[in-house]
Image (cartoon, rainbow, N blue to C red):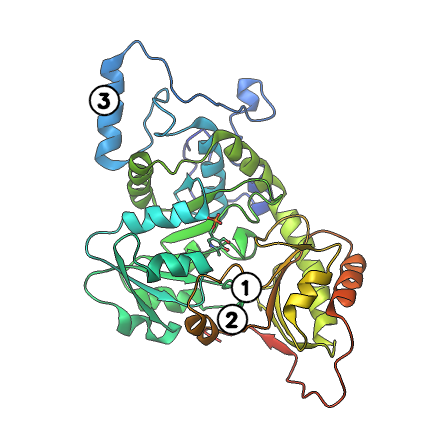
Amino acid sequence: MDTPSTGAHGDVRAASRALATEAVHAGRDDLARQGLHAPPIDLSTTYPSYDSRAEAARIDTFAADGADPSGPPVYGRLGNPTVARFETALARLEGTESAVAFASGMAALSAVLLALPHPRHVVAVRPLYGCSDHLLTAGLLGTEVTWTDPDGIARALRPETGLVLVESPANPTLAELDLRAVARACGPVPLLADNTFATPVLQRPAEQGARLVLHSATKYLGGHGDVLAGVVACDEEFAGRLRRIRFATGGVLHPLAGYLLLRGLSTLPVRVRAASANAAELVRRLTADPRVARVHYPRLGGAMIAFEVYGDPHEVISRVRLVTPAVSLGSVDTLIQHPASISHRIVDAGDRRASGVSDRLLRLSVGLEDVDDLWADLDRALGDPVPRGTRREPAFVSSEAGA
Ligand code: PLP
């Protein structure tokens, strides 16, 4: 058990608290002492101070190592108390020292890449979310990428490699990696695990050796489809680097988004477990359905399903009525999308297919509706029975590393 220490909000750190307790209390432990129940939203962009010598000292300290400036805030781009509550809570859930929030998942990934020493060489495993793949492939931030399979990570490392980047379960195939083995293969090179799909409810990559844990907080952490955000949970040294990049490049999270994310975290364990139970039942029904060629579902569980249909996937999308045909995921309601058309459209078609993203693949983000209502909608959307004589492949594929 950790010795209790003081967090960003005077929280008493109690490492023995269960995840469900942390989800509700982390980032809020000071509220009762302040006579508050709901966390306040601080919308200030700037903060008055009659002591500019003290402000200069705080800015110097921040510029040196990116540590959260002590004392009253200075300017919204340096840090915001409402956003800091979300950061404190997420770090607690992921089991890291710190977390740094950004305006979106892509802003978070950009900050990580900008924080790497030059020359910026990255080793990455496909599939990744389409835009993450594109950011690396296009070298927009001056990075060079080597794509490899999980077994090739150690061989792909160079003296100048600054980062290894993986997603597990991966978007959209739900391929899973042995994060411990990946972390071992990385040696001293920082491993970034995108934990957007699993959330800390199902998996805590930092415990398995990942130095950086990234979320598109737009998804399960927010959980209601109304916040765009990103966050990186990591050690305090890397967090300092990320805060300095955030200060200089401006990809800050709005305080209202910070408030909504903190609220979202409090129901995260309940939402993820309930949606996962729905997903497991839908996996069972899809696997048994002759119109479905393959179902991908992680061993880890979760509320994301990918499946391939014999028919036209665009027709399935056009026929849903209860399920929303939309990109994104992790909301209380169920969403379906065709990765080859939307989330992974920007990836070269050859690379996309080679990483297992077939043109027949549909990605379902299962929500909290009644499972029979969801099945009734999917059943209708899947359309007519497959004509006799169509060859069926084994329907269920538990997603394997690199598969
Ligand atoms: N990582 C994963 C796994 C994602 O699915 C996404 C978005 O879909 C991102 C990162 C990027 O996040 P955002 O859309 O919040 O910028």
Task: Find disc 1 in the rendering and name its residue.
Answer: 339
Q: Amino acid under label 1?
A: Pro
161 versus 333 height, above or below: below
Q: Is residue 192 left or right of residue 173?
A: left
Crowding near the residue tagged with mark 1, few <14, some 14–19, many ≥20 C-alpha atoms within 10 Å: many
Cβ–Cβ below 8 Å for labels 3 and 2?
Answer: no
Q: Nearer the viewer, residue 243 or 3?
A: 243
Crowding near the residue tagged with mark 3, few <14, some 14–19, many ≥20 C-alpha atoms within 10 Å: few
Viewer-side label of 3, 2: 2
Q: Amino acid under label 2?
A: Val
* Residue 357 badge: 2
Measured in 3D between alpha carbons, the distance from the residue under mark 3 to the one under mark 2, in whole angstroms, is 52 Å
The residue positioned 54% from the left and 43% from the top of the image is 17
Q: Quadrant of residue 374?
A: bottom right
* Residue 101 badge: none
Measured in 3D between alpha carbons, the distance from the residue under mark 1 to the one under mark 3, in whole angstroms, is 49 Å
Measured in 3D between alpha carbons, the distance from the residue under mark 2 to the one under mark 1, in whole angstroms, is 7 Å
Is label 1 within 8 A of ligand 1 (CB to nearest ligand atom)? no
Task: Find disc 3 in the rendering and name its residue.
Answer: 57
Q: Secondary structure at mark 3?
A: helix
Q: Nearer the viewer, residue 36 or 313?
A: 313
Q: Quadrant of residue 386?
A: bottom right
Residue 237 horizontal/vertical position (percent) = 29, 43
- Residue that extends furthest to the bottom in the rendered view of this protein: 389
Cβ–Cβ below 8 Å for labels 2 and 1?
Answer: yes
